[in-house]
Amino acid sequence: MLAKNLDQLTALDALFLTQEAADTPMHIGLLMFYSPPPSGREKVRFKDILRTFRERAALAPIFHHRLGSVPLGIDYPFWLDAENLDIEFHVRHIALPKPGDWRQLCIQVARLQARAIDRSRPLWEAYVIEGLDNVDFLPPGSFAILYKMHHAAVDGASALQAIHALHDESPRRRKNSRGEAYHPRANPGSLELLGRAYLNRLRSPARWWQAARDIAPIPGRLRQGFRERRLQSVKSRHSTRFNGAISPHRVIEGRFFDLDEVKSIRRRVGDVTINDILVTVVAGALRKYLESKDERPAFTPMAMIPVSYRNEDERDAGGNLVTAMSMAIHSEIEDPLARLAAVHEESLSSKGYTEAIGARTTQDLAQVIPPQLASLAMLRTGTRLMFSSGASAPVNTVITNVAGSQAPLYLCGAELVSCAGFGPIMDSMGLFHAIMSCNGVISIAINACRDMLPDPGFYAECIQASYEELRDAALGAA
């Protein structure tokens, strides 16, 4: 008899495993900054952080699930409980050398981001980083934690949800009231996994039927969108320096902004979203950077925008519940307010395409692909064929937006003051922008191929300048 409640990777989850290579680690990075507890309170010790991870590892599957492969690769892997969960392997403790400034932190985090996660264990790591005394936006005694989580196990929203399980809502440390101590379940053997794979194959005809039902109404919805002028024509595609084969080397950078000020910009300029504003800032930064290389685009670059379709019932679910839309970001427009207006219109159109196609349709279609075919890493092969043919890349960068908690959160009494995110890059997409917010601070951070972007500090200056130009134009507008 088959054991109950055994979670399985979806086709999209498994894609992040099959596309991973030595030069292409497929994990999400979340860099969280903590101010020290107020004077008079006990200093946060590394052993306190270890204890928190031990006590709360049961609260989020990412912390205790490992991959369980089906024999012969005839189905997607299952999530099994780690029998000997070694928290001290996963949580590491390092310190920056003096002077301990922002540049040193970025270099260290980039090195950590470039290293793949050990697949024989639960797919996460955490690095407690001290010695940040010369990071100018942090008070003395602050520390950071870089959380690395494999994209096969989490998307941006579920990664943040897992990390929040480690935190308290007040400086006073709560007991493990939302879960029990971790006790691994007995894992199924190879025969049981084969039995589950067999049952999944029996369900394949139903999946094909569901996929056909999802696809059938799409052309009609698209035609209606064009008639109602909600959808715009697809833009031509061109490559930039960030489209090509990536190296194993990484750079990271970021800038932080006051969320209330961003909201003031939104109120002043009218019917736009915060995401429209930040995408416009990224588009301006990309313009400035390419212009400095004598590569200013005469065309509109295209961005891939991941979109979550996670509902409230799926808030605590792991895995990837996302689709993606392709959107023109209009870096060719110099005026920041005109660029914002164009980005807003493109966003509405791209959302219309997503609604017409159906947010879950891509996931449903992927599920009917046989696992053996998916394991051939078709995406990497196709990308390299594209390079050899001289074809233009479908998108030039990725821009994702993940909203964190705006209420204060605490880890062992230390307050979470800001955060930054880093998504995986791959061949043809060598620049990834992550927009994250928490506790009244919003960040734009990048992960990039070092060969494509050798001067990340300058790119961060481009982000800052682009933001200030848009802010000044908006808040100075009548």
Image (tube, grey):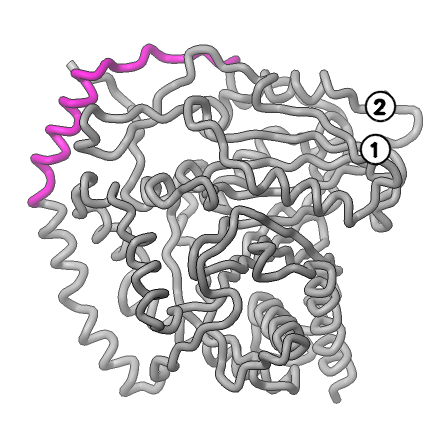
For label 1, the residue is: 36
Q: Where is residue 322 in the image (x, y as percent from the top left)?
A: 39, 52
Image height of 255 relative to 191, above or below: below
Left or right: 300 in relation to 43: left
Which residue: 38% across, 73% down?
A: 392
Residue 380 numbered tag? none
Frontmost residue, 411 versus 193: 193
The reply to whether residue 340 is in sight is no
Frontmost residue, 283 versus 343: 283
The quadrant of the picture occupied by the C terminus is: bottom right
Q: Position of residue 28 (x, y in %)?
A: 52, 43
The reply to whether residue 65 is in sight is yes
Left or right: 321 in relation to 444: left
Which residue: 74% across, 21% down?
A: 46
> In the rendered structure, does residue 196 fall within the stretch colored magenta?
yes
Image height of 434 relative to 243, above or below: above
Q: In which quarter of the image is residue 448?
A: bottom right
Label 2: state its secondary structure: loop
Spot the residue most to the front.
Answer: 388
- Kindly check if marks 1 and 2 are in contact, taking CB atoms under 8 A apart as contact: yes
Which residue: 19% across, 74% down?
A: 219
For label 2, the residue is: 43
